[in-house]
Image (tube, rainbow, N blue to C red):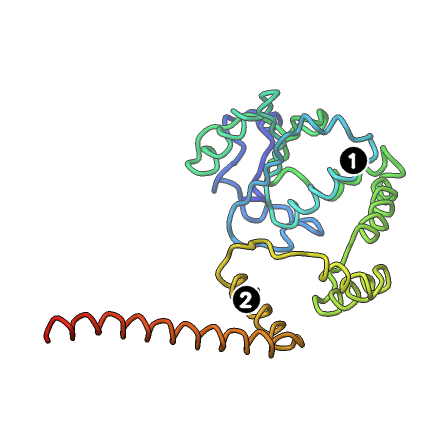
């Protein structure tokens, strides 16, 4: 198929493929670099948003164009630049896909002049045609090199590797230890009060501290003796009251 391609303008035919009518002996051999990776299938490389090609300089765009055409040449692929914003090569791509799939008529020739509508059908391109771009722009080989050299150092500087968790926490602890005095946390702990004073746990510990402090105080023995004397006097009063109630009942029985 590649060798039988005929440009529609030169052939004056309704299709770009001659078919099986060509003599096998008349087919020209493939150029160097053509179909170097022949997979036996048809490829179409479609470049979208071709309207953005205006942002590149002539040398930069020529460098990109050369690399794309060499890539397509090795695969035997068709190269199409499309833009839905500018409506470039949308219908052409559809017609070409139908032509390659079903053998319908296709009369559009290759176009390599306008940036946003480049069309290189399979079988048309070659190394000699690609060399024409290099001859028109002498510095095309080094067109994109300054951009790459500037981008690499920036990428390395922005690259940040995450530190291991334990080492990071250890450094953070050392930083806090040097920034805050050692006595400050203890003083803050003594000054702080419980968040909830009425909680059962807080009341329990508060009463426990009061009992312990009372036992340890010197007046605890005296308070214990006073309470024992009061209890003894209360017992005597209860006994005398009971005896007085029992005496009238005996008199009435008599």
Vertical order, 185 against 148 (above or below):
below
Vertical order, 134 against 217 (above or below):
above
Q: Which mark is residue 207?
A: 2
Q: How many marks?
A: 2
Place of residue 170 in the rendered image (x, y in percent of width and height, measured from the top left) = 76, 68
Vertical order, 88 against 63 (above or below):
above
Place of residue 113 in the rendered image (x, y in percent of width and height, measured from the top left) = 72, 26
Q: Residues within 10 Å of mark 1 (few under 14, many from 20)?
A: many
- Horizontal side, residue 95 vs residue 136: left or right: left
Quadrant of the image occupied by residue 192: bottom right
Q: Which mark is residue 62?
A: 1
- Horizontal side, residue 217 vs residue 12: left or right: right
First in sequence: mark 1 or mark 2? 1
Quadrant of the image occupied by residue 219: bottom right
For the residues carrying marks 1 and 2, which lies nearer the camera in this image? 2
Place of residue 31 in the rendered image (x, y in percent of width and height, measured from the top left) = 69, 49
Taking the spot 70% from the left edge, 28% from the top edge, the residue there is: 52
Q: In this rendered view, identify the residue nearer to me: 53 or 76.
A: 53
**Residue extending furthest toward the top:** 86
Classify mark 2: helix, strand or loop.
helix
Vertical order, 11 against 228 (above or below):
above
Q: Which mark is residue 34?
A: none
Classify mark 1: helix, strand or loop.
helix
Place of residue 125 in the rendered image (x, y in percent of width and height, measured from the top left) = 67, 39
Q: Residues within 10 Å of mark 2 (few under 14, many from 20)?
A: few
Taking the spot 51% from the left edge, 49% from the top edge, the residue there is: 41
Alpha-carbon span between mark 1 and mark 2: 90 Å
Taking the spot 89% from the left edge, 39% from the top edge, the residue there is: 139
């Amino acid at each position: 198929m590649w060798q039988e391609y005929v440009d529609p303008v030169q052939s004056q035919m309704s299709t770009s493929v001659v078919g099986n009518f060509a003599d096998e002996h008349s087919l020209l051999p493939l150029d160097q670099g053509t179909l170097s990776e022949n997979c036996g299938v048809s490829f179409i490389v479609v470049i979208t948003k071709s309207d953005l090609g205006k942002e590149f300089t002539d040398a930069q765009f020529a460098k990109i164009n050369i690399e794309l055409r060499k890539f397509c040449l090795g695969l035997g692929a068709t190269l199409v630049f499309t833009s839905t914003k500018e409506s470039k090569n949308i219908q052409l791509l559809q017609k070409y896909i139908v032509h390659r799939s079903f053998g319908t008529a296709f009369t559009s020739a290759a176009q390599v002049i306008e940036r946003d509508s480049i069309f290189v059908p399979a079988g048309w391109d070659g190394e000699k045609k690609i060399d024409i771009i290099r001859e028109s722009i002498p510095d095309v080989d080094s067109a994109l090199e300054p951009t790459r050299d500037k981008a690499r150092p920036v990428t390395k500087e922005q690259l940040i590797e995450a530190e291991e968790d334990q080492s990071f926490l250890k450094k953070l602890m050392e930083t806090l230890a040097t920034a805050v005095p050692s006595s400050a946390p203890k003083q803050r702990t003594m000054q702080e009060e419980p968040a909830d004073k009425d909680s059962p746990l807080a009341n329990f510990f508060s009463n426990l501290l009061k009992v312990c402090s009372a036992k340890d105080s010197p007046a605890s023995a005296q308070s214990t003796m006073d309470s024992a004397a009061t209890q003894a006097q209360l017992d005597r009063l209860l006994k005398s009251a009971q005896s007085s109630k029992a005496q009238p009942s005996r008199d009435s029985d008599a």
